[in-house]
């Protein structure tokens, strides 16, 4: 089962992802955290806006799959952020989810 855990790009993934068969989106960003955690069976996560080192203790592996690029060379907080594919959470989502809550 796949899930996406992201920061502010979560809304765009949720809105435009269905035609591309993207996974359900979960986010710890602001009020999105309160919508709930990924299901316990989610063992592959696409994480946007996190450094690999910030997730290495939470997953068995994380690889950089690319970087965000808005295509118009406009700097913003998401531009050039890594897109990570992380596998095998090190705990249950019930234990891990509180660590993803953040306000910014």
Image (cartoon, rainbow, N blue to C red):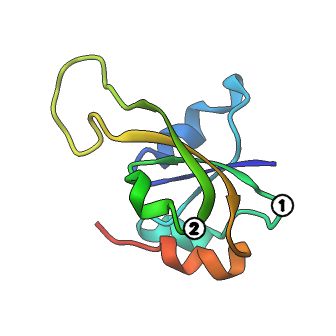
Q: Which residue is mark 1?
A: 41
Using the image as rendered, state which of residue 95 and residue 73 is in the foreground: 95
Image coordinates for residue 34, horizontal then vertical, percent: 57, 74
The crowd level at tag 1 (other Cα within 10 Å; few <14, some 14-19, many 20+) is: few
Compared with 24, 34 (above or below) is: below
Compared with 54, 44 (above or below) is: above
Camera-side mark, 1 or 2: 2
Residue drawn where x is 37% and y is 53% of the image: 51
Image coordinates for residue 93, horizontal then vertical, percent: 70, 72
| Of the image marks 1 and 2, the number of the one nearer the N terminus | 1
Quadrant location of residue 21? top right
Image coordinates for residue 97, horizontal then vertical, percent: 60, 74
Residue drawn where x is 50% and y is 77% of the image: 99
Compared with 97, 3 (above or below) is: above
Using the image as rendered, state which of residue 5 and residue 31 is in the foreground: 5
The outermost residue toward the top is: 72
Quadrant location of residue 60? bottom right
Q: How many marks?
A: 2
Using the image as rendered, state which of residue 64 and residue 23 is in the foreground: 64
As measured in the structure, the alpha-carbon distance from the residue carrying label 1 to the one carrying label 2 is 15 Å
Compared with 4, 96 (above or below) is: below
Residue drawn where x is 68% and y is 24% of the image: 20
The crowd level at tag 2 (other Cα within 10 Å; few <14, some 14-19, many 20+) is: some
Q: Secondary structure at mark 1?
A: loop
Give left or right: position of 79 versus 21. left
Task: Pick the quarter of the image with the C terminus.
Answer: bottom left
Residue 58 image label: 2
Residue drawn where x is 70% and y is 80% of the image: 94
Give left or right: position of 54 versus 37. left
Q: Secondary structure at mark 2?
A: loop
């Amino acid at each position: 089962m796949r899930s996406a855990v992201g920061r502010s790009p979560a809304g765009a993934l949720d809105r435009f992802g269905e035609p591309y068969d993207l996974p359900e989106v979960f986010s710890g960003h602001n009020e999105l955290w309160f919508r709930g955690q990924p299901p316990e069976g989610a063992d592959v996560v696409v994480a946007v806006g996190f450094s690999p080192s910030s997730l290495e203790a939470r997953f068995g592996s994380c690889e950089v799959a690319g970087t965000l690029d808005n295509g118009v060379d406009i700097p913003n907080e998401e531009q050039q952020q890594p897109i990570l594919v992380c596998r095998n959470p090190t705990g249950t989502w019930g234990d891990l989810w509180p660590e993803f809550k953040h306000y910014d």
